[in-house]
Image: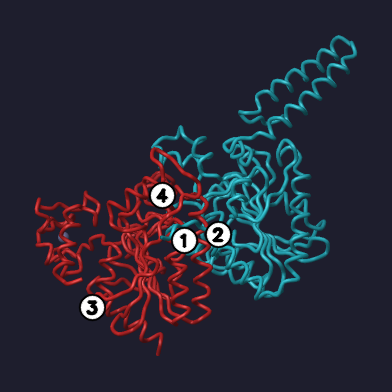
Amino acid sequence: MITFLEFEKPLAELYEQLEKTKEIEVISGIDATPTIREFEKKIEETRKELYSNLTPWQKVLVSRHPERPYTLAYIDGMCDKGSFIELHGDRNVKDDKALVGGLASIDGESVMVIGHQKGINTKMRQYRNFGMPNPEGYRKALRLMKMAEKFDIPVICLIDTPGAYPGLEAEERGQGEAIARNLFEMTQLNVPVLCFIIGEGASGGALGIGVGDVVYMLEHAWYSVISPENCSTILWRSWDFKEKAAESMKLTADDMFKNKLIDGIIKEPIGGAHFKPEEAIHNVREAIVGSLKKLKKIKPEKRILQRIEKFSAMGVVVEK
Amino acid sequence: MTEESETMVWFKRVKEGINTPTEEKKETPEGLWYQCGKCAKVVTSEEHKSTHWVCSGCGYHERINSKEYFHILFDDNKYIEIAPNMTSGDPLKFTDTKKYIDRVADSIKKTGENDAASAAHGKIDGLDAVVVAMNFNFIGGSMGSVVGEKISRAIDHCLKYKKPLIIISKSGGARMMEAAFSLMQMAKTSAKLTLLAKAKLPYISLMTDPTTGGVTASFAMLGDVNIAEPGALIGFAGPRVVKETIKKDLPKGFQTAEFVLDQGFLDFIVERKDLKAKIAQTIKLFQN
Ligand SMILES: [Zn+2]
């Protein structure tokens, strides 16, 4: 079963026709290979066509595709086989299932990987709280980052969240303070920090593990201060302007890069990361290896200074 | 500016209704009287100012802007503004029901302020200090590039002249029309605050009604000392959003300064009449 997004309707129809042709072939016993080849070719062309012209809203849909690879899939695919040891808990309140992390190695070198985790099916989505961390998630992330710093291990953050959880207990336990503390502490981390927006990068909940020496976005990921739906509700007072909001917010990787708010874009396979997860994961892995090589050559003090300068330069003001 | 002319400006502002949300106050047509939005007590505007815009009947702390906080904190109301002419760009050429540049221009006209934060340096009980205070009536005190840059410049001034920093937050959160630029102000201000910390310069964060969203999740919660005015709404998610999430009524007093103090995220709550003395005392003890 393939999950088709609303804009993938032409693809869905072609797949349906392909399946029918295959059925007829079996029933009739007549060789339909040429027709099947033609459909397959058509499918490839259509997919390429669709995915090279995605609107910002369509990208938002792709970023939320239920089969898109999440943090644990990346860890499994890009770290050395069997090297990952998940580390749990903030040592204070509990273990947040929406934010995972642990030690692993890539090409034999230790890394601390931290990321939002969404559930892979209905049951797991609940368990993972839809990738929306509570304060203890951010505090677990900070604990792991400080541990990485202690052992001189680079930090890799994989960002994919619809936002920090806006619940009652999250407020009681200081969601704002937890995120603020991470922004502050990540700025001064002595080790290289690499951040990747692999899906949804919504607001402070994303930024809470997003202060890095390099911040990369996957081609169809989005990153902004609020989701387009909520932006539409607040500014247009209606849910109906989400597409317009997605466009206006300039939340795509291309726009974010043009506005110098991220450092680079990572290619996704044609059809999106969900279509060929191993390819997307491979591309992220390549970026990690390449960036680490460069970042390790820079002295920690200089790296931190560059990090501060980069974020300090963000913003557009007019002075008379 | 003489005391009298300043008062006149104040009267004019009250009359124009720009210092408080309209639902919280009522004025006589002359603008010479202030009626408390909580207990309905009526005082002259002069009296109201003398109590630092706090109701003498019930203690309600009226929402005030940067100029009023500067008046409360700086000795003899003497201060020099940092980058007062800085205004917002429009990096995204944003338009919702209105063009962002028009919204900004209208807010400047309406409030007499150039954006949602003003920064100034002067003396507090004889001590050099830098104060950044927010203007809630400027697009809901929302944080865009100007708020971030003002804080950044204020910190630069602190670093250069070895001065303590006070930030008075009053904000609904992000400036949505600046989208990701707004979001990155959280990282920017927090990153700059690490420099202040490294230089061992004190930072006092005062949270006033309301302090929510990205401001709470960045500089507001990062004070060496976090303090708040009584009754102030303080939170990350706004109460409406939390209510929608849990699908239940919120407990009484939820997200008030008193609640946040009890949860352990504030050092103390301070009434406006004691604000200057408490801040000065804290700085003195830090500077030893
Ligand atoms: Zn009153």
Which of these two is toward me, A266 or B95? B95
Ligand 1, what quadrant? bottom left
Of tags 3 and 1, which is closer to the observer?
3
Q: Residue at x 60, y 68 (%)?
A: A143
**Disc 3 residue type?**
Asp
Label at residue B242: 4
Is there a contact, CB below 8 Å, between mark 3 and mark 2? no
Residue position for label 1? B217
Q: Is residue B216 visible?
A: yes
- Classify mark 1: helix, strand or loop: loop
Q: Residue at x 59, y 63 (%)?
A: A310
Considering the image in quadrants, where does the N terminus of chain B appear? bottom left
Q: Position of residue A166 (x, y in %)?
A: 46, 51
Q: Residue furthest front?
A: A320
Quadrant in which residue A47 is drawn: top right
Callout 2: chain: A
**Disc 1 residue type?**
Ala
Label at residue B76: 3
| Residue A268 vertical placement versus A26 (above, below) | below
Callout 3: chain: B
**Are discs 3 and 1 located on one and the same chain?**
yes
Chain coloured cyan in the rendered structure: A
Residue position for label 2? A208
Decide if ligand 1 comes within 8 Å of the CB at mark 4: no
Decide if ligand 1 comes within 8 Å of the CB at mark 1: no
Chain coloured red in the rendered structure: B
**Disc 4 residue type?**
Val
Q: Of marks 1 and 4, which one's residue comes earlier in the chain? A: 1
Is there a contact, CB below 8 Å, between mark 3 and mark 1? no
**Are discs 4 and 3 located on one and the same chain?**
yes
Q: Is residue A173 visible?
A: no
- Classify mark 4: helix, strand or loop: helix
